[in-house]
Structure formats: structure tokens, C-alpha cells
Amino acid sequence: MRTWVCVSGQRVEIVLPFLSKCRADSGRCCQTCTPMSWDDFYSKHLPSLGFRDISRVTEKDTRFRGWLVRRVCALLAVCSWEVPADTPGDLAARVCRSRRVRDVAPARGLREDDGWGRRWKGKVLELLGDIQGPLSLLMLRICHWALLKLLSRLFLSVQLHRGQLEMVLRAASTPHVPLVFLSTHKSQLDGPLLSFVLFSQGLGVPRVTVGAQGCSPRLRSLLRRLGGIFLPSRMEQTPSDPEDALPGAVLAAYMEEVLRSRQPLLIFLEEPAVPLHLSASARRWLALVLRAVRAGAVPDVLLVPVGIGYDVVPGGSQPEGARGAQPLSIGACLWAAFRALRRNLGCVRVDFAQPFSLQEFVAKSHVRHAGKPEEPLLLLPTILGTWPSQLDAGNTEVWAPGPTTATGLEAPEEVLVTSLGLHSLSDSMSCSAIMSVGITSALLLHKYREGVFLSRLMRDFAWLLEEILLRQHDVGFSGQLRVLVQHSLILLRARLSLYHLSPLGDILVVPKASAETWMELGQHSAAILPVFASEAVGACAIRALLAEMLPFLEPPTSASSIIFSQDELHRKTLELLRLLPPTLLGLRPCQPLDCWSEDIVDKLVLCGLLEPEEAEGEHWVCDTAPRPFSRRQPWPRMDFSDSESEDEAPACRCFKLGEPQGSPLFLLFLCRLLSPALRTYAGAVAFLEQSRWPQPEAAYVEELLQFLAKEGSELPNGSLALSSLQTFKEMGVLEEVGGPPGPLLHLAQPFRSSASRERLEAFIQQFIQP
């Protein structure tokens, strides 16, 4: 193991694992935002504790032994699970007496000895009943026993890392500090699955927040008895109505009581239909937690990012418009479970990242944002040629909050909530294990669309697996290489054609050429992009530079003979980083973009895609920062005499293209990882000319998806369409203007001309690899 200091000043440990002998140590908290939490609840021996399949319950999980126990061990195990923390019996009285409720109550409502006071208390109790319900232990155990049986039939295994579990149990033993789990959201099964995981492992019955998915009254009532909590109906319908503050006060008072009782709280950061975007409901729940801590309800809160990795996401192959279109009911849930039982879903892996302190995150955020410029650096002047690109302006971050989410917080607090949500979403994505189906899908989608022999696919599977482990990401599988590849091909068999070639003794794997095939392979391989995001951005920057220079070179010139300067790479990388949102790339929002850009160049050198080039007869005169890829000190040949001016800039570093050993066409593979997102952005630019202005945001997104489906050969991705909308609003391409019917989108004045739109489309097209 080697330790080096990167450009951003963080301690980075590089582990070179031997395949199948070393698990990646992923999921550590951020050193920039929570340096004091870096060593808390963590020990070096935790990654080596192994895994357990929590869907397989045996007599060892009970206090009894014998033949009959082996037959009913699941029921006995569920009945033995304890509930360490529960809702206080006088919850309603506490909420009515809370300061938040009394502040919004009229003077007459504070007296309970008259009719007005009783009616006011009745409103409070009605709202409290709409938010939550008392836990039914009998119903809880019956449903979890049924869920245990369902999980054992849906999945081959439900893997949980013992070291991660021990780390969370240590955090749960902290006195007077509750746990809040912040999870990604890939399927409607995530809520029951995580509730089962926490309950079965001794962490208690979590209070699970329910997002924007509508539920029938009967299902809503059942979920409340099992630990689900909802936003009040009036807040969902009119979240920004200032005249009715009672629902918000009751919800805030209830959140304080949940945290005081140390019940674990589970918040989903995104919606299954729109991944990689911090949902409005997640912002609201995070704001409530932040308010409770600032009000002194609890001294602190430990936040635990959670990642879920599926071989095949339950219900994930449905078109995005069909998911979440109708309210869920008990019958619909049972029918969905019956349909899922008819399909092989493979394995699932649940990962917990290192817990970190909310108080520490808030304190560091105030210090970090104290000197931050108010206006982000926009790409608009660079694209239109009205403002020269400035490399020294890269310190400005582009992670601004989205549209007003009506959390009731002031602007600085809204920025803090957004930063916390995006940071936690990035941590959840980074700790999620990569599944075998994801690796196979990425190879078939981005490298072998025309087909590949099984022997070649196995070699590339082993190569990509090693690259993932080298980047400190864990995988959710183990076993022989041939068995793993065959397992993934079986799960993808509906989208593949397999041909056995007897003379060659090999199998030809050919993806079916259909939009549904590319959509499903894209969904399975989505987890690969955050692993290679830095290298993919750098590869697209190299591709853009090559596109600029090749027309001016002689035809025999090869790409490997072209020299790139560090400033050119830095400039192109920054342009692409400013274009794409950080959640799409899995980047933490606490680091400035220029640091990411310099780290990207270092990673390209480390993986062999760039080779340092030194002109003949000259020596490098670079900065003296430690370089991870250099064994020699950078200063032995430098002249430290006073003969030269101190203001003289050091010579620029230069690089040429390299070919990593054992990974041919790695540059093209990295470029194609970002091609779906960039093609969506380019399609959104073409849509600007055909759209009607002004129009509401929802109508714009719907028409954009229809346009992309008509113009492209693949089904459109709603999440990428929303990302393009967010980017265009931040760049100034689209303007949001309020009106009587609501906010409307207007096309900005510079882009009403076709020449400006062509410049924007050309700017995006330069990064796209066909």
C-alpha cells in the first residue's frame, strides 16, 4: 500500500489488489468536509470480515436447535428480533406542547378548555395521523417473515458486508446521537429491503420516508403501521402556502421527537424514475433533520450513506413513463411481486458507507463557502466567443441548488441542504458495489455492439474487473470467471442472441439491435460511469483536442505522435466538467473544478493513456508538487539561483497518447461511456429550434423526450433529459420567468438565432465519440 497527497491536499491510499485476494476499501467519508469523522467507527480489520447472505436464515440465527427448528427457523428468527427504540406513548401530547406548534397556534388555540382549543388539537392529531402511525409489532413480524420468504425466492443472495455492519453498529451505540440513513433509490423494493436489513441486524425498525410515489389509502395506512412516514397531504398539494403553517410545524415537531427517541430514519435521495437527481421530497426531509439539530433536539446526527446494487433491478426494464404514473395499491404490489417471481433477478448487495457527523459537515460547509463567489462561471461566454476562457477562474463551483424546493429555509440554508444531499448521493453511489451484469452490459454496449466471442468477452471481463478494483470500488460477486460471465449472460438472455460455432469451439454473443436492448444494457451499466468518470472526462477532452488538430495535420500523421500541452488538456477538461452535472459523474460537490481537472490529468497518466513527453535537450521545469507517477524528485535539475526572475512562469508539461498494456481501445471505451449523456445534450440543443416558447417545465421535458425518441435510434433517458434542462438553465440558454399560471421557460435572447444554437451544438459534438 502506498500513500500520496493529491492536488486537492487529501491523503489518498493506493491499493494494488491481487485478484480475488483483496477487497476494495470503499465508502470512506470525505476528508474535506468531515476530517474528524475519517477515523471514527472504522478499523483496518473491517474490510476483511467477509460477507453474509441475510436472506438465508438457519437454526444458528435462533436460540433453539433441532429438526423442528430447522423447519420453522425463519419464523423463530423474525419473532426474536428486538425493537430497541419505539415511538413514545405520549407522542401526540409532546407534539401539541412543542414550541413549533404553539408558535403557529392562535391565542385561542392554546386553551384546551373550550371548543376552539379542542378543534385545534383535533387538527394537530389529524395531521399527525396523516404523517405516521403507531407500529404494530404483530403485523411488523408477519410482513417481515413474508418478506424474508419473498427475498429468498427473488434473489440468489442478499449480500451484506460484516465489516460495514460492525461499523454501523458502533455508530448506533453512540449515546444520544441517532442514525439517519441516506440511500439511493433504484426500485420500489428498496424501502422494504432496507427496512428488513436494519430490523434483522439489530438496528431497530426504521422510519422510512415515502417520496413522491402516490399510494392508495389502504396501502398508505399499512405502510404507516410498518414504519412509513409521509408528508402531510396539504403540504404535498400546496407546499409553499404561507397561510397554512400548521402542517409544517407538526411535521417539524414530529421529526424532533423521532430523533430524540433515537429511531433510525431512512431517507431516499432520488426517485427510481429519475435517478442521479436529488428529489424535492429528499430536500424537504433533509431540511427537517437540519432544523431539528439546529433547534437542539439532539446534539448531533450521524449520517450513513447507503448503496444498493442489483444484478437486475426489479421493475427496472419498464419504460420510464410507465413507472410512477399511477398510485400504488396493495393489489398492484402483490401483482408486481408475482411477476418478479417469474424472472431470475440474480443477486443484490447492500453497502453502508462510513458514518459522518452532520454538525461537522455544517461547520465545515460554512467555512468552505465563506469566501465563495456569488456568481458561478458560465459556459455561455466561452461558447459564443464573447469572453476568453480563464483557467484561473476554475475555483468557482457550479453546484448551485435547483429550483426552489419550498423547504422553508433561507437561501444559505437551502444551499447547505442541497450540498448535503448531493454530497450524500455521491457517497452512496461510490460505496455501491458493481455487479457482474453491469460489467458485461458495459462491454456489450460500449465495445461490442456488433457481437463478440465468449472467450474474448471473458478476457475483457477480467480486465475491466481489475480496473474497477484498482480504482477502489468493490464488486458484488466472486467465483470463477467463466461462471460469472455465464451468469450475467443468462440474466441478459432476453436481449442477446447466442450462436455456438462448433468448428471454433466458441460462442458468438450478439446483442439484439433494438432500442429496448440498448435501453436495458444502459440501465445495467449505469453504475460503471462513476467508477471511470474522471478518465472518461479526460478521454473526451483528448477526443475534442484531436478533432481540433487533425484537420491541420498531414494525412500520414498518427494520433500517438501528437503532443498535448497541460494547459490544453486543462482547458478542455474544465469545459466538459462545467457542462455536465456532478451527480452524473459521481463527483463530490466540495472540490473545486480546477482540482478535479488536475487530478484527471494525473489519472490519465497513471492508467497509461497519457505519457509525459520531454523535448530533446530540455528538462521539465514543473511545479514541485509530489507526482504519484514519478519516482524521482522533480527538483534535482532545477536552478534555484537568483539569476532568473521570480515571476517567470514554469514551463508547461506536455504529453502524448499512450496505449495501456492489456487494454486496447481503452480510450474509445471511455469516450463512449459519456456518449449517451452528450448525445442527449446535443439532441436537446436541436429541440430548442422546434419548441414553443414560453412553456412550463413539465411540458418542455415531455416534448423533449418525444423529440429524442423520434430522432434517435435509442429510447430517451428521462434523467439525462432533466440534466440537460438543469445545465441549460445554469448556463443561461433557458430562462425561468414567473407568471400567473406558474414559472415558464423562455429561450434566452442570444440563442434565438440559429448561429448561436449551432455554436452550442458544435461545442457539445466535439466531445462525442461515434
Image (cartoon, rainbow, N blue to C red):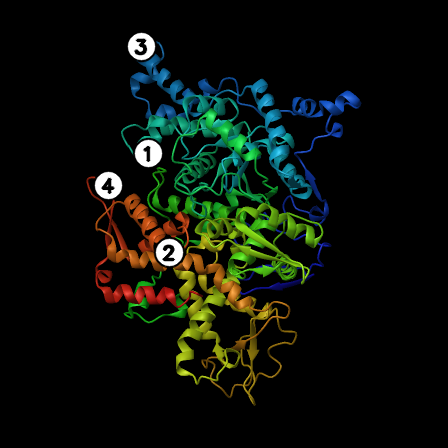
- Looking at the rendered structure, the secondary structure element under dot 1 is loop
The Cα atoms of the two marked residues, 3 and 1, are separated by 29 Å
| Nearer to the camera, 122 or 766 | 766
Asked whether 711 or 174 is in front, the reply is: 711
In percent of width and height, residue 6 lies at 57, 64
Q: Is residue 702 visible?
A: yes
The amino acid beneath tag 1 is Pro
User: Which residue does the numbered mark 2 point to in the structure image?
Assistant: 712
Mark 2 Cα-neighbour bin, 10 Å: few <14, some 14–19, many ≥20: few
Q: Which quadrant of the structure image shows residue 95?
A: top left
Q: Which residue is mark 1?
A: 239
Give the amino acid type for the residue marked by disc 3 in the picture: Gly
Which quadrant would the C terminus be assigned to in this image? Answer: bottom left
Q: Secondary structure at mark 3?
A: helix
- Judged by depth in the image, the label closer to the viewer, 2 or 3, is 2
Q: Earlier in the sequence, mark 4 or mark 1?
A: 1
- Tag 4–tag 1 contact (CB < 8 Å): no
In the rendered view, would you say 183 is above or below 381? Answer: above
Residue 376, can we see it?
A: no
Q: Residue furthest front?
A: 503
Q: Nearer the viewer, mark 4 or mark 1?
A: 4
Q: Earlier in the sequence, mark 3 or mark 1?
A: 3
Specify the amino acid type for callout 2. Gly
Residue labelled with disc 4: 742
Query: Which circle, 2 or 4, is nearer the viewer?
Result: 2
